[in-house]
Image: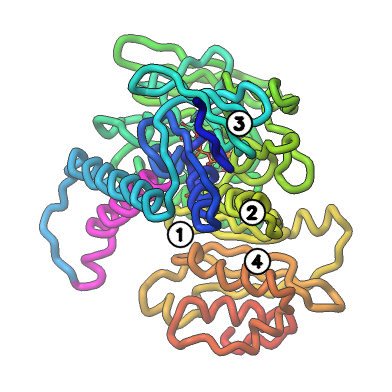
Amino acid sequence: MADMYDVVIIGGGPGGYNCAIRAGQLGLKVVCIEYRGKLGGTCLNVGCIPSKALLHASHLFDAAQNEFAGLGIKTGKVELDLTQMMAQKADAVEGLTKGIEFLFKKNKVDYLKGRGKILGPGKVEVELLEGGKQVLETRHIVIATGSEPATLPGIEIDEERIVSNVGALSLKAVPKKLVLIGAGVIGLEMGSVWARLGSEVTVVEYLDRILPPADAEVAKDAERIFKKQGLTFKLGTKVTGVEKTKTKLKVNIEPAKGGDAEALDADVVIVAIGRKPYTEGLGLETVGGKTDKRGVIEVTGHFKVAEGVWAVGDCIPGPMLAHKAEDDGTAVAELIAGKAGHVDYNLVPSVVYTNPEMAWVGKNEEELKAAGIEYVKGKFPFMANSRARTNHETLGFVKILAEKGTDKILGAHMIGTGVGEMIAEVVIAMEFGASSEDIARSSHAHPTLSEAVRQAAMAVEGWAMQM
Ligand code: FAD
Ligand code: NAI
């Protein structure tokens, strides 16, 4: 006889596992199905966590060589142990994966290792990793199947020399010449890692700027800083193909608007041109579910695919970020339990974990201009922040945009050390509909980098006192 559940969740990434934990907390009988063999999805296994482990370690490697002496710390020759760097990354991933299994047990969430397929309303078949099949019956199905890397026609990913995020996080040696296709988040983060470890990095980007979703002023400053760090950008350029010889790769490029072709030599090519939802073999059609041209599952209002079928995370519209997937998953569990559940995508922050970091929330200047919304801008450079100067980390700025007339905060855009943590302050302020003056009049500890946020807020009304 089939098991009867309140909720069957397909996919154990941040969307799925957080939905499962919250459903368990709310007393629902819930099972999460994951075929990877490990929980945590893209984020934990081949995304957020391993990339941050390498960003952190490679940053310290770089600092030990280029910054420690200036701080009065002598090290002798600093050497790279890539095997150990990869091992500590694997260790972080392993520990966190196990942590989710523990949280499942704590919240009475069942966990099935296998591939989930919807058979129709209230029915999910699981092809178990250990062999055999099981059919589950349920009141609700939650699709949390995430995304996979987008590919370029004619460029075949082998995960050895032409790699996606998966191979990029596990290269066996530091490539002498590395070409990244796409100057988006992965391009900049992975480009930073391998440049710090010694690669000659070229980033090829189709558009004439880096990091399209970021505020243009932030992106421009970042481009200048990354060039100084040794990254080469080929903007407004398209890749037409990659030729493989036994030992080398030849990346053929030409201007996006047409012009003379050229070729770049590479040992490794990372393809990072975005991600697409993953819904292969899911049986979406059996419940009347639809996808758009890009494969994004269509949902009405609050995550609804059909009666009793919901979808969350990277496979539905909205930013493809782990905390967005987490918020979606939590909201759906609450909706199923009869509570309210809503996520405001305008208030989902973005962070790029380079050095310096970039972080933003709400609307940027280009978006406000396009929407015809009048705004006032307050900007404060880290060069004028006492803690940044003390730490010799003076790159970047904080910019706050507030509505003209009401002073309501519409967006915040930052580049600088630690801004990935600082953005949370503005997210909360915006959740409460705060004005820039609310931040400007709130006490911020001294000396902290976050004083720059306060000064930028003061600058909106023209009274920043430290510049
Ligand atoms: P996923 O994490 O993709 O999880 C979906 C899971 O479903 C997968 O484990 C998959 O195996 C499983 N699955 C799919 N189909 C089935 C099926 N039929 N049956 C059973 N299981 C199935 N976001 C951030 O917020 N911060 C970061 O720093 C960050 N860094 C990133 C770095 C990289 C290199 C990459 C690639 C992504 C990064 N992201 C980051 C994005 C983040 O990883 C995703 O937004 C997030 O993982 C989406 O969560 P999800 O649950 O929707 O999907
Ligand atoms: P992305 O969407 O961030 O960037 C892709 C870039 O590739 C864009 O600049 C785009 O213009 C460019 N591009 C597209 N087609 C191209 C082509 N044919 N030739 C050259 N350039 C081309 O995608 P990315 O970097 O692959 O990352 C995928 C997603 O994963 C991100 O959008 C983000 O949602 C998530 N992510 C989040 C991180 C974070 O939060 N820190 C870190 C890494 C990934």
Contact between marks 2 and 4 (CB within 8 A): the answer is no
Q: Earlier in the sequence, mark 3 or mark 1?
A: 3
The residue sitting at 64% across, 31% down in the picture is 122
The residue sitting at 55% across, 77% down in the picture is 452
Instruction: Measure the alpha-carbon separation of dots 4 and 3.
Output: 29 Å
Closer-to-camera residue (173/96): 96
Q: Which residue is mark 1?
A: 356
Q: Earlier in the sequence, mark 2 or mark 3?
A: 3
Disc sitting over residue 412 in the figure: 4
Relative to 147, residue 372 above or below: below
Region rendered in magenta: 47-72
Residue 22 colored in magenta in the image: no
x then y, percent, for residue 295? 67, 27
Q: Secondary structure at mark 3?
A: strand
The residue sitting at 86% across, 63% down in the picture is 373
Disc sitting over residue 277 in the figure: 3
